[in-house]
Amino acid sequence: MKSVNDIADMIMYDFAKQNLKSNNIIDYKRIIHVLMKDLNPKEKELFDAAIQTLVADGRITVEDRYGYCLVLSPLGEESIYPVDKENTIKKIQTTVMSWFESQNSRTGAILVFQKFNQLFASFNPKEKALLKDGIEALMASGYVESNTMGSTPVLTLTEAGYDALYV
């Protein structure tokens, strides 16, 4: 049987699984049909206590936004997305360079910024906030350059980037 803390962790995991940010909500319908769905009757009795624990910790608030909902607080966001800035920047660089490699790219190949939503879909909001830093670090290494194709921003693979891909 799940404890109050287990249920509280399950609620916070649901915020993280959906990549929600501070002030985003889990609505009543999701609470009933997703979060409480697999709880047994005794665990369902603990659900309100789990919510009160999260409210007391400052990780969520409970509000009426066109119905009952759980609202992720800034502290809650911080708790579900621990980010190591240095590793995240490396992860961004690796993601971009891996994309160029997967396309068998040569010098001058482009990555359209519109592709970023797809490339970084699995990143949480705090990791996405570091995209600019990761791209700037990649440009500082000389592997890519920022350009435009018409009015569309693109990253262009440089000769140094090409050499780094196929060592």
Image: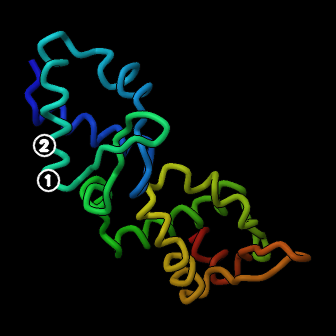
Q: In which quarter of the image is residue 164?
A: bottom right
Numbered tag placed on residue 57 in the rendering: 1
Q: In which quarter of the image is the N terminus?
A: top left
Q: Quadrant of the C terminus?
A: bottom right
Task: Specify the amino acid type for callout 1.
Answer: Asp
Q: Residues within 10 Å of mark 2 (few under 14, many from 20)?
A: some
**Residue highlighted by disc 2:** 53
Label 2 element class: helix
Task: Specify the amino acid type for callout 2.
Answer: Thr
Instruction: Name the side, left or right, on which 74 lies relative to 89.
Output: left
Residue visible at 28% across and 49% down? 61
Marks 2,1: beta carbons within 8 A: yes
Instruction: Name the side, left or right, on which 166 lies relative to 125.
Output: right
Task: Give the percent coordinates (x, y) of residue 41.
Answer: 17, 10
Label 1 element class: helix
Residue visible at 66% across and 63% down? 100
> Where 164 falls versus 104 (above or below)?
below
Q: In which quarter of the image is residue 30?
A: top left
Task: Give the percent coordinates (x, y) of residue 133.
Answer: 49, 80
Extreme residue in the top direction: 41
